[in-house]
Structures are given as structure tokens and as C-alpha cells.
Amino acid sequence: MSCRLRLHDQGIAMLELMIALLIFSVGVMGFARAQLLGKQAAYDALQRSIATVLAGDVLERMRANASHVRLDSVHALGGAAGWLPRPAADCETSSCVGAQWAVYDLWHWQQQLRGGTLLYPQACIVTTAGTVRVEISWRAMSRAVDEGSSPCAEDGGRRHRLTLFSFLGSA
């Protein structure tokens, strides 16, 4: 009788071990998923920070040369709009007047946008009566909240968007 009890006890111990192993593996998978979501959120936050710095940079460039910012204009960069060609005047190696600086600054900023870590960036700069709206969108790892349609977010879904508004003053 004691032999039977021991075999039965060994079966229960094996069952307990398998259940404990199942619970442990579910916990490890949950931890791995949390790590993945954390890395994804950190990468998305990095991309939003880069977009914020780029939007601030183009606003400062426009403020520095406000008298030559074209009012009532829209500049769409990237995506279906394409990219601006290199300007004829290289303002870093030769002297330029205000209008040439405005064209060169926009082209130089575009190069920073293209060469950064944003995935498939697109940008729109809209100036109207002394105000400016800078919108940058990029493809992100996580799904984006639907913020409405925009020419700067053509392929929807995973495109994140940052919009900054500012006042340039009268030119």
C-alpha cells in the first residue's frame, strides 16, 4: 500500500511542476511583451523629440529672416510633393541677400529633415498673414491616433504628426 501512495505522490509532484512551469512561462512572455512595448514607446518619443527640434529650427530660421518669408504660401516637402532642388546660391560659401537666404534656409532645413532619424518624413510649412504652421509627419512603430486628413500625412495609419503654430510678426 505504501508503494502505491508513493507512485501517486510522484504523479502529483510532476503535475505541480508542469503547472508551475506554465505559470512561469506566461509571466516571462508578459515581461518580454512589456519590454517590447517600452522600447517602442521610447523610440516613438525620440522621434517626436527630433520632430519638435526640427520644427523649432525652421521657425527660428524664418524669424531670423522674417522680411523675406513668403506670406500666403505653402511648402510641402517629401512624399508625393517631392523635395526641393539645391538652390543656385550656396549661402555658406558665398554672400547672399535675404531672399536667397530664405530659399537656402528652407533647402538646408529640408536636408536635416531627410537626413535625420525620422522614417519617411514629410513636412508642410504654411504661412498666412504673419502666422506660420509647421507640420511634420513620419512613419512610426506604433499606430497613430487619427488626427484628420493632412497633405503631410498621406499614408495614414502609422504616420505620427507634430504641428507647431507661431507668430512671425509683420514683415
Image: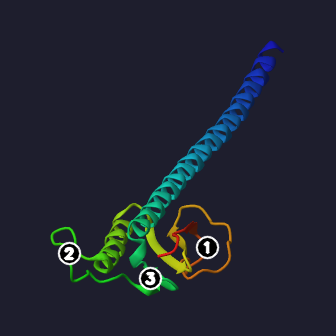
Vertical position of residue 59 compared to residue 5: above or below: below
Between tags 2 and 3, which lies in front? 3
Residue sitting at 35 percent across and 76 percent down? 102
Between tags 1 and 3, which lies in front? 3
Residue sitting at the far front: 170
Crowdedness near tag 3: few (<14), some (14–19) or many (≥20) residues, C-alpha within 10 Å: some
Type of the residue with mark 1: Gly
Residue sitting at the far left: 93
Residue topped by disc 2: 90
Residue topped by disc 3: 70
Residue topped by disc 1: 157
Q: Nearer the viewer, residue 45 or 96?
A: 96
Between tags 2 and 1, which lies in front? 2
Local secondary structure at mark 2: loop
Residue sitting at 50 percent across and 53 percent down? 43
Image-based side of 155 in relation to 8, left or right: left
User: Label 2, label 3: how many angstroms apart (C-alpha)?
Assistant: 20 Å
Residue sitting at 67 percent across and 38 percent down? 27
Question: Coloured how?
Answer: rainbow
